[in-house]
Image (cartoon, rainbow, N blue to C red):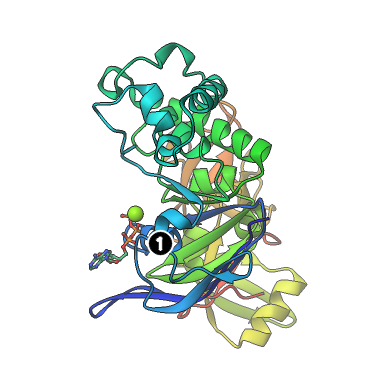
Amino acid sequence: MAGLTLRAVAKRFGTVEAVKAIDLEVADGEFIVLVGPSGCGKSTLLRMIAGLEEISSGEILLDGRNIDAMAPRDRDMAMVFQDYALYPHMTVAENLGFALKMRDMPAAAIAERVSEVARMLELDALLARKPRALSGGQRQRVALGRALIREPEVFLFDEPLSNLDAKLRVGMRMEIRKLQMALGTTSIYVTHDQIEAMTMADRIVVLRLGEVQQIGTPMDIYERPANSFVGTFIGSPPMSLLPATLRREGDELNLLFGAGQEIALPKPRIEALTRAKVDRVEVGLRPEHVSLAGKSRADVAGFSSDIILVEDHGADSVAVVSLGGQEIMARVKPGSARVGDAGRRFHVDADRLHLFHPETGAALV
Ligand SMILES: Nc1ncnc2c1ncn2[C@@H]1O[C@H](COP(=O)(O)OP(=O)(O)OP(=O)(O)O)[C@@H](O)[C@H]1O
Ligand SMILES: [Mg+2]
């Protein structure tokens, strides 16, 4: 059992508040991803959990016990860094076995554990090599193996895949998740890559300027972003954000974009907006909220636009179109839209588009 609790954990570097009073409850065996833009405090938070950075205030508990005064080596956590941090003069086998040697494990037992972990990570054939004779992906696997071999209570990962090429990253993120699930080790994984966060996490913690924006499962966060920052940060291609004014017409309420394109809102959305007492909103549109409505059917609830650009992704395509004078993206079937097509009709999913407060950015629900 290794649940981790953060209570109002904060870090100040002089006047810089790198992490502001973060509360987080990590369940035993859970895979938590900390995600956010550069400088938002991800590494600082992870380093405080590891004990590599002192906390300014708050407390950290492992299995209900306060570990703030505990040295990093006593915390039973293994950290995997972005730059691998392998010992260059040691072979792969020596790198893997180093932590066990430091704990005075007998050589025969170390050799057994090393070959076990090497098998798990397909490093068997590379055990006699030095790190400089390995590819980036192989080095990353050795770094991972060094963490695995210790059988720690908690894994801490700080952008472990960011030095790898795109294809290797996809393979490695699956390997890491499979190993973690098999071992059941509580894990905290830092990344600025929202796709890694979406695909790997049991729960995502979105950070911005040292503050938690939202905590939830990937689909929670994707479908119900707490604010426009989370909405635009999570999702690929990204959500477009565009200002709209509200135009009331009897019981109806329309979003008015730019000069005159209007979209009627369904009843629950009207109620939310009435409660919020706003006359303007920021509208968050994901590409899948905007779709082609067939050939110029002016009766479809939506808008007309020329096709500005088409990106083919293989299984689907994304068309860049214009709504209210602003470019947005629409998900379309490959081949169904061509650059230069004029006046195509688009349907907007008014049930699913996101509405945010024009000043605070908070979701209006
Ligand atoms: N030792 C330090 N002294 C002063 N400020 C620091 C120190 N370490 C980090 N900071 C500041 O704290 C903030 C958070 O840094 P941190 O490294 O945690 O960000 P990050 O989210 O990991 O970013 P990245 O994605 O670029 O790695 C930044 O503004 C950074 O400049
Ligand atoms: Mg960092």
Residue 163 position, x and y percent, is 33, 35
Other-residue count near label 1 (Cα within 10 Å), few / some / many at <14 / 14–19 / ≥20: few
Residue 149 position, x and y percent, is 51, 35
Direction from residue 255 to residue 135 in the image, left or right:
left
Judge whether residue 313 can be spotted in this image: no
113 is higher (above) or lower (below) than 157: above
Residue 288 position, x and y percent, is 61, 47
248 is higher (above) or lower (below) than 54: below
- Residue at left offset 24%, top offset 80%: 15
Q: Quadrant of the N terminus?
A: bottom right
Residue in the foreground of this view, choosing between 13 and 96: 96
226 is higher (above) or lower (below) than 93: below
Residue 86 lies in quadrant: top left
The three-letter code of the residue at mark 1 reads Ala
Q: Residue lying farthest top? A: 125
Residue in the foreground of this view, choosing between 82 and 330: 82
Residue 144 position, x and y percent, is 46, 35
Instruction: State the residue position of label 1.
Output: 71
Direction from residue 53 to residue 69 in the image, left or right:
right
- Residue at left offset 37%, top offset 64%: 41
Residue in the foreground of this view, choosing between 212 and 10: 10
Query: Is ligand 1 less than 8 Å from the beta carbon at label 1?
Result: no
Q: Quadrant of the C terminus?
A: bottom right
Q: How many marks?
A: 1
Judge whether residue 364 can be spotted in this image: yes
Instruction: Give the SS element for disc 1.
Output: loop
Ligand 1 quarter of the rendering: bottom left
